[in-house]
Amino acid sequence: MFPLVSRHHPSTFHSSTDSIASEDYLSYRSQISPKIYSRDRKFSPVKQRRATAIMASGWSDRIYLPTHYQLPTRSMSPAIETYPKLSSVSITNRIATVHRQTGETDVTVTIDLDGTGICHAQTGIPFLDHMLHQIAAHGLFDLQITATGDIHIDDHHTNEDVGITLGMALAKALGDRKGIVRFGHFVAPLDEALVQVALDFSGRPHLSYGLEIPTQRVGTYDTQLVREFFVAVINHSLMTLHIRQLDGINSHHIIEATFKAFARAMRMATELDLRRMGTIPSSKGVL
């Protein structure tokens, strides 16, 4: 028998404490980046290809190495040791609630940036509710949005004010934006439609809008209101947002692909970067 070595984290491998018999085989798998080490850190291309093939084959979760290949006395990825562990990082709940009332609408938005995709949306505009569910589900944000407005006139004021209040809640939940990735991008397909979104929580609101929606309405929803929604969000979250339609002929597909790509880009941008914890992601030191 050969000694067992933990394969759950590279830092558990120590050749100084885990002796290896010269004729046995050691099996292990690193969760981060499996590599093969020899005593002089050199190995043949054949053995490299064989080990890679075993790992890629999927029939086993282990990689088999001759035991004269030694593991280093330090962790396999020493740079990882300098990063804070998730359990040791103090993260304030990134949850915000904003209530905004005007003579035309009454909107309340609660957002949890570290949620699981739960959404409760009642805006009085069914298609907008459907799009807000896309933001929650694909951004993994928890959203609770209620709105009443003068929809007996049209959907414009309520649609815009939901965007305004969502943008305000985003800005409040992000706080000083320390430790976030800041940039996000995604390309989302939906059948024939393909939409690209890139964004930056830069502190400078800007919208570059490149959708060409072929119909005036989707159901009862005025498709001009898509742009108005994003204008409202970026102005009050202080976000730079670029939207590009790469393909698509169906209005519903184009709009939904846009919201899905927006959600995934926001998820990327708002996630915490463990290498940047406690610092603002800007060379200026402020966003």
Image: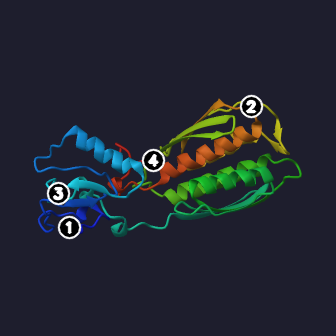
Between the C-alphas of marks 4 and 2, the distance is 32 Å
* Residue appearing at x 15%, y 43% in the figure: 42
Q: Secondary structure at mark 1?
A: loop
The residue pinned by badge 2 equals: 249
Q: Is residue 102 left or right of residue 140?
A: right
**Residue type at tag 1:** Phe
* Depth order, front residue of 172/197: 197
The residue pinned by badge 4 equals: 182
In this rendering, the label closer to the viewer, 3 or 2: 3
Does 23 sit above or below residue 249?
below
Q: Is residue 234 visible?
A: no
**Spot occupied by residue 54 in the image (x, y as percentages of width and height):** 34, 49
Pointer 1: residues within 10 angstroms few (<14), some, or many (20+)? some
Between the C-alphas of marks 4 and 3, the distance is 45 Å
Q: Quadrant of residue 91?
A: bottom left
Between the C-alphas of marks 1 and 3, the distance is 9 Å
The residue pinned by badge 1 equals: 2
